[in-house]
Amino acid sequence: MIISIASGKGGTGKTTVATNLALFLSGEKSQDVRFLDCDVEEPNAHIFLKPQIEKSRSVSLPIPDVDQKRCTFCGECARVCAYNAIVVLKKEVLTFPELCHGCGGCSLLCPENAISEKKRGIGVLEEGKAGLIKFVQARLNIGEPMATPVIRAVKKTIRGDVITIIDVPPGTSCPVIESISRSDFCLLVTEPTPFGLHDLKLAVELLEKLEIKHGVLINRAGIGDDKVRDYCEKEGVPIMAQIPYDREISVLYSRGIPMWSIGEPYREVFRQLWELIESQVNVDR
Amino acid sequence: MRQITVISGKGGTGKTVITASFAVLARGKVMADCDVDASDLHLLLHPRIKETHQFKGGMKAILNEERCTGCGECIEACRFDAIREEKGQGSESQGTVIIDPIACEGCQVCALVCPFDAIRMEENVSGEWYISESKYGPIVHAKLGIAEENSGKLVSAVRKNAREIGQKNGLELVIVDGPPGIGCPVIASITGVDLVVIVTEPTFSAISDLKRVLGLTQHFQIQSVVLINKCDINLENTKKIENFCGEENIEVVGKLPFDNAFTQAMVQGKTIIEYGGSGLVEEIENLWERISTKLRK
């Protein structure tokens, strides 16, 4: 079962909910859990789960390597490249690796077989354990624009036998889509403010388009207004849980301490949340 | 004309609320909301849309089912797992090829390898961008379509149009509200600007994100300053940020306290400057004065 934790707006508490849910499943339910931090631009779950990293490897994209001796400068590679990552001059071929998406078109279609591929590292993937939780995260190299291939590498570590919890980056565009694809359920974490509501609506539209079951967790309940609740009720989006605003949670968060460690009443929030998630996953749409 | 971008690495540190205050305080400026996947600046500045433009951000592969023989060459060639074959009913019937428009990266390799010319590439409308007028001046903003990509290109379009409006109207400044993260839309939001303001907060997560986003501005050699928001949530961490910035030779341009007035102002759809309250306005005015002095240099 794959459960992703997302939100349109950043800073609503995705990582908090994802890490605490994993701690609950592993610690109290004795479930095998795999935790994926797909926020490869700004990964933070490690701060709360404190994993022991056991393996680390580079994530790379295949980019063109032009054999200038074989090349006849015909320009076919530049014509087929949709990303302007290759330019053919009279006596030279220039490549722009940071524009290359690694589609393989140029090497496949070069009439002279003058293009092979080489690997270009764009991130680092790490695997380890946080207690009994299997932990996977990756970091996009600084200055690299494309997060999606790095997220794809994180998602390739999913195995079917255990519960997978995915911490998703903020927003609604390609990195989010890659992170939540194939989820059995996506929990949207929001806060009861106009920004929270606006970005929640975008996220709900996205999940409807992707046909992924979803529900909402209202974090910092009490700080703003009731419009998130009104919206969910009107649109029939299930409210799965709410966590009241508590300065103690913020202070502990600031020090990298999960709210699970406070004990009650927060543990009960995650017990009830999990029961609801399980029942939602098992309902046919 | 000068350009300033507000970013944060981590989401939810208060970027947009701060940017909106700067929009009220700055003179002779145009705003650019470059958080195109979840733009919120308009919720505080209430612009009236004057022009709407379609944004064509890339290509998508479209299948001509009549020509397709189901040979599978395209499936073999696609590296983005965007093409699959759905088996037909019964053993005799032929399967159908399906292209997933969401997974398609627009690389056109499928169209080029298809022996039957059954795939064509079509320009894809992936969002809209707007030129609007607000009480505080012109604003260029955008909405990326649901499940669309190329947000970096849309950011570039927003910035380009904001600059053009600024030039046409003889304005001095472009204020850019940037997205979270360090990837392509962030890079597109900061390249070529005069100053980046990084809004952080004293939490371990935000500090970790600050270091990465500062690495990014240093990588592109863009001058940056740090603003510590909600500084009283954890004074020890605030000190850590100040020490870190000292070591990196980055100015901490201001510190703002945690204050529920920020949320209350947002609920009323107001900037904190309009909402007023508890000395915050004066602090933000002083902050803007320091930043604008830096910009004039």
Image (tube, rainbow, N blue to C red):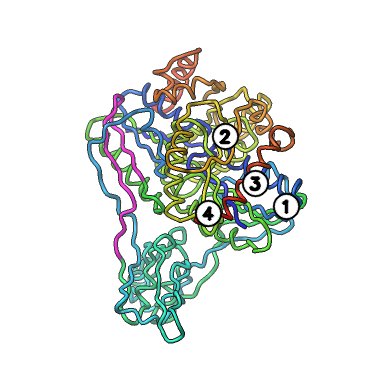
- The quadrant holding residue B45 is top left
Closer to us: B42 or B283: B42
| Residue B259, visible in the rendered structure | yes
Q: Amino acid at mark 2?
A: Asn
- Marks 4 and 3, the one that precedes in the sequence: 4
Query: In which chain is the residue bearing label 4?
Result: A
Q: Is residue A270 left or right of residue A192?
A: right
| Residues drawn in magenta | B122-143
Residue A68 in percent (x, y) is at 44, 75
What label sits on residue A180 in the rendered view?
4
Closer to us: B91 or B23: B91
Q: Mostly what secondary structure, the magenta segment?
A: strand
What label sits on residue A219 in the rendered view?
2
Q: Secondary structure at mark 2?
A: strand
Q: Is residue B286 left or right of residue A258?
A: left
Callouts 3 and 2 close, C-beta under 8 Å: no
In front: label 4 or label 3: 3
In front: label 3 or label 2: 3
Residue A199 in percent (x, y) is at 44, 39
Same chain letter for marks 4 and 2: yes
Please state, as top left, top right, bottom left or bottom right, where the C terminus of chain B lies in the image: top left
Q: Amino acid at mark 1?
A: Ile
| Disc 4 to disc 3, C-alpha distance | 21 Å
| Disc 3 to disc 1, C-alpha distance | 20 Å
